[in-house]
Amino acid sequence: MSQINQENENIMNQKTQMDEALDGLIHAIHESPEYKRYQDIRAKVHELPELEQKIHAFRKKNYETQNFADEWDLYERVDGLEREGAEFRKDPLVNEYLDAELAICRLFQKINWEIVQNIDFDLGFEIDK
């Protein structure tokens, strides 16, 4: 077997190994308590389309505030969002949904953090944790 063919075979084996590991990670996420809780509460919220729409609108506003607000109105937008969120979270179903969503997001952050910390990839700067 030529060296090029051997290298191609090694690359294909590594891809298969990576795909299998990724499938295992996805399976582990599906079996995690965070994911199961999120799916359960998500199904309950989905049965209430008006509430689901309000939750998504609130989440969109939160996302836009975090990612697109300019410096000048950021404080006002965050303050308004916090007040709105506190009122919105008085509904136990909304509170449970947002808590479950936060738990699954933290799980994803943990997975990403572990990968970044354990792969030799030079960002050119250090991340404060």
Image: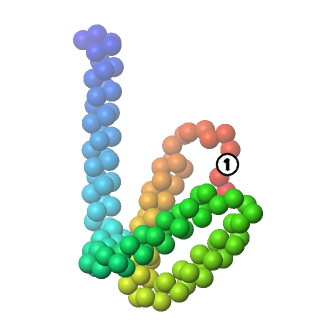
Identify the residue shown where x is 64% and y is 72%. Answer: 78
Give the number of callouts.
Answer: 1
How far across and down, in percent of the image, does residue 90 sit?
47, 89
Identify the residue shown where x is 28% and y is 15%. Answer: 5
Identify the residue shown where x is 28% and y is 10%. Answer: 2
Q: Give the left or right position of residue 84, taking residue 5 as reference.
A: right
How far across and down, in percent of the image, does residue 4 sit?
33, 13
Name the residue type under label 1. Glu
Q: Is residue 6 visible?
A: yes
Q: Give the left or right position of residue 30, taking residue 65 as reference.
A: left
**Relative vertical location of residue 60 with respect to residue 82 in this rendering, above or below:** above
What secondary structure is marked by label 1?
A: loop
Image quadrant containing the N terminus: top left
Circle 1 sits on which residue? 126
Which quadrant of the view contains residue 10?
top left
Q: Is residue 41 visible?
A: no
Which quadrant of the view contains residue 48?
bottom left
Display colour scheme: rainbow
Image quadrant containing the C terminus: bottom right
How far across and down, in percent of the image, does residue 33 sit?
33, 72
How far across and down, in percent of the image, does residue 95 sit?
44, 83
Q: Give the left or right position of residue 32, taking residue 69 as reference.
A: left
Identify the residue shown where x is 51% and y is 55%. Answer: 113
